[in-house]
Image (tube, grey):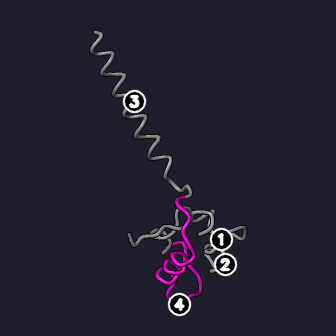
């Protein structure tokens, strides 16, 4: 019975640790990129230099709603992108 209790406790620790680890990274800020990295990501994400739209943002943006700024227009301008970079909301997918 004691062994069962120990194993159950360990299983709960593993499951709860996995659940909290999954939640910790979901849409939360990551490492802040330097200016050169931000520029590299912007050019890869937005070849025409205009806007980064929601449907194309997943490889580059951690949390689209936060990066989109107060206007919430469904697209990220270069200005919004720079602010998102400073907040750690932009991923660097070239590692």
Q: Is residue 34 magenta?
A: yes
Residue bearing the label numbered 2: 79
Q: In whole angstroms, how far apart are the C-alphas of marks 3 and 2?
A: 43 Å
> Closer to the camera: disc 1 or disc 4?
1
Whole-percent x, y for residue 4 in the image: 28, 16
Q: Which picture quadrant has residue 38?
A: bottom right
Whole-percent x, y for residue 55 in the image: 49, 73
Residue at the (28%, 9%) spot, across then down: 1
Q: Residues within 10 Å of mark 2 (few under 14, many from 20)?
A: few
Q: Which picture quadrant has residue 74?
A: bottom right
Above or below residue 67? Residue 10 is above
Identify the element where label 2 is drawn.
helix
Identify the element where label 4 is drawn.
loop
Q: In whole angstroms, how far apart are the C-alphas of marks 4 and 3?
A: 48 Å
Whole-percent x, y for residue 32 in the image: 56, 64
Quadrant where the image shows the C terminus: bottom left
> Closer to the camera: disc 4 or disc 2?
2
Asked if residue 49 lies left or right of residue 11, the reply is right
Q: In whole angstroms, how far apart are the C-alphas of marks 1 and 2?
A: 6 Å
* Disc number for residue 13: 3
């Amino acid at each position: 019975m004691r062994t069962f209790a120990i194993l159950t406790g360990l299983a709960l620790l593993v499951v709860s640790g996995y659940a909290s680890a999954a939640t910790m990274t979901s849409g939360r800020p990551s490492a802040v990129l330097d200016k050169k990295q931000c520029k590299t990501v912007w050019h890869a994400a937005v070849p025409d230099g205009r806007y980064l739209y929601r449907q194309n943002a997943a490889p580059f943006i951690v949390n689209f709603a936060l990066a989109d700024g107060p206007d919430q227009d469904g697209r990220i301008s270069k200005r919004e992108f720079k602010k998102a970079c400073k907040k750690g909301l932009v991923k660097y997918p070239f590692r």
